[in-house]
Amino acid sequence: MRMELKHDYAHRNKTMAVLQAPQAGGQKSKHLVRVVGIDMTPMVDLGFLLITFFIFTTSLSEPTSMPLNMPKKGEPIDVPESKTLSIIVGKENKIIAYEGMWENASALKQSGLQDVGNIVRKKQETLEKIQPGNSREMVVIIKPLKSASYGGLVGVLDEMTINGVRLYTVVAPMPDEEIFAREL
């Protein structure tokens, strides 16, 4: 016994499924076989409506950027060595941090990117012990080497924001600093 699915296009909008049973004159069988046909048009329409809805209501993620404030043109400002912290960013996110000028570098620290926050906080604490409010005048000089990764530099900049460092700058390292950092 063979069942056939008949398409009735005149009633297509009224019926969503059709069940056809065999005609009475065919071979007789112990099992009655039924064929079910489902009209998928409403399901497809619903799918496209949902896709359209989500496309129009979803906003694309806006790229985030870090604000960069450039200094005003004018006379350079003298900053006491005691309030400066220099951070050299090298390859593989290794850093070298020191206080003051390179020639008189005191407390030279070599570590990884994960320690930048601790180094900055220790310097802030030291300045606060000398005089309350001194840490707000701290200047951090960030010096990425050519071998430094972009992610390493962004990580150091993030630490400046996290620790509330108001004054920081990114400059090229001096030749002596590059030579020293390459030897590590």
Image (cartoon, helix red, strand yellow):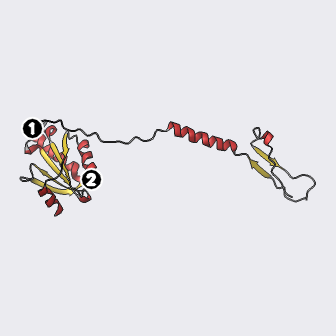
Pair 1/2: label in front: 2
Question: From the viewer's perspective, is 9 left or right of 134?
Answer: right
In what quadrant of the picture does the C terminus appear?
A: bottom left
- 108 shown above or below 75: below
Across and down, in percent, residue 22 comes to 87, 53
Quick check: 44 left or right of 144? right
Q: Position of residue 19 (x, y in %)?
A: 80, 48
Q: Earlier in the sequence, mark 1 or mark 2?
A: 1
Q: Residue at x 42, y 41 (%)?
A: 61
Horizontal side of residue 89 vs 8, given as left or right? left
Q: Nearer the viewer, residue 36 or 63?
A: 63
Dot 2, how many residues are within 10 Å of its Cα: few (below 14), some (14-19), or many (20+)?
Answer: many
Q: Which mark is residue 42?
A: none
Q: CA distance from mark 1 to mark 2?
A: 32 Å
**Side (left or right) of 37 relative to 115:** right
Mark 1, residues whose alpha carbon is within 10 Å: few (<14), some, or many (≥20)? few
Residue that appears at 22% across and 48% down: 117
* Residue placed under numbered mark 2 in the picture: 152
Q: Which residue was labeled with disc 1?
A: 131
In this rendering, the answer to whether 1 lies above or below 128 is: below
* Camera-side residue of 31 and 23: 23
Residue lying farthest to the right in this orientation: 25
As shown in the figure, which amino acid type bears the numbered disc 2? Gly
Q: Position of residue 119 (x, y in %)?
A: 18, 50
Q: Image point 68% across, 41% down: which residue?
A: 42
The quarter in which the N terminus is drawn is bottom right
